[in-house]
Image (cartoon, grey):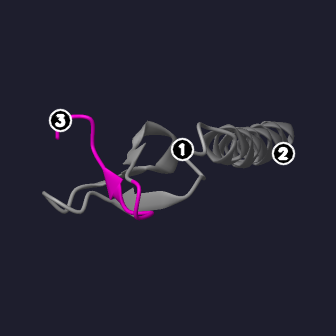
Amino acid sequence: MNLLRLLLIAIVIWFAMRVVKRVISAKTARRGDPGYRGNMVTCEICGVYLPENDAVSTQDGKFQCDLH
């Protein structure tokens, strides 16, 4: 009877450790790089989307990538 109780406790501890490990890995995955969160604009010549900070503004308020 003691062996069965010990085996049951070991299984419960193993299962609890797996659950905790999954929760921790899920939290660290959500904390990853959020990516770019600024305004995206379109190059009026080639149509490529790029961050507004990287775009060149024209006199009429439109944007172009630095290749044009």
* Residue 38 picture location, percent across and down: 59, 53
Cβ–Cβ under 8 Å for marks 3 and 1: no
Highlighted range, magenta: 59-68
Q: For residue 18, what is the image quadrant? A: top right
What kind of residue is marked 3? Answer: Leu
Q: CA distance from mark 3 to mark 2?
A: 71 Å
Mark 1 and mark 2 lie on one chain; the one further toward the N terminus is 2
Quarter of the rendering containing residue 62: bottom left
Could you tell me how far apart the alpha carbons at marks 1 and 2 are, in whole angstroms? 50 Å
Tag 2, which secondary structure?
A: helix
Label of residue 35 in the image? 1
Badge 3 density bin: few <14, some 14–19, many ≥20, Cα 10 Å: few
Q: Please identify the residue farthest to the front as the structure is shown.
A: 59
Disc ID at residue 24: none
Q: Which numbered disc, 1 or 2, marks the residue closer to the eye?
A: 1
Classify mark 1: helix, strand or loop.
Answer: loop
- The residue that disc 2 covers is 5
Residue 19: x and y, percent?
71, 49
Frontmost of labels 3 and 1 is: 3
Question: Looking at the picture, does residue 17 appear above or below residue 59?
Answer: above
- In this rendered view, identify the residue nearer to me: 34 or 31: 34
Q: Which residue is mark 3?
A: 67
Find out whether residue 39 is within the magenta segment.
no
**Would you say 2 lies left or right of 68 here?**
right
Q: Residue 9 appears at what percent x and percent y?
A: 83, 42
Q: Amino acid at mark 1?
A: Gly
As shown in the figure, which amino acid type bears the numbered disc 2?
Answer: Arg
In the rendered image, the vertical position of residue 40 relative to residue 22, given as above or below: below
Identify the residue shown where x is 78% and y is 46%: 16
Does the magenta-highlighted stretch encompass residue 65?
yes
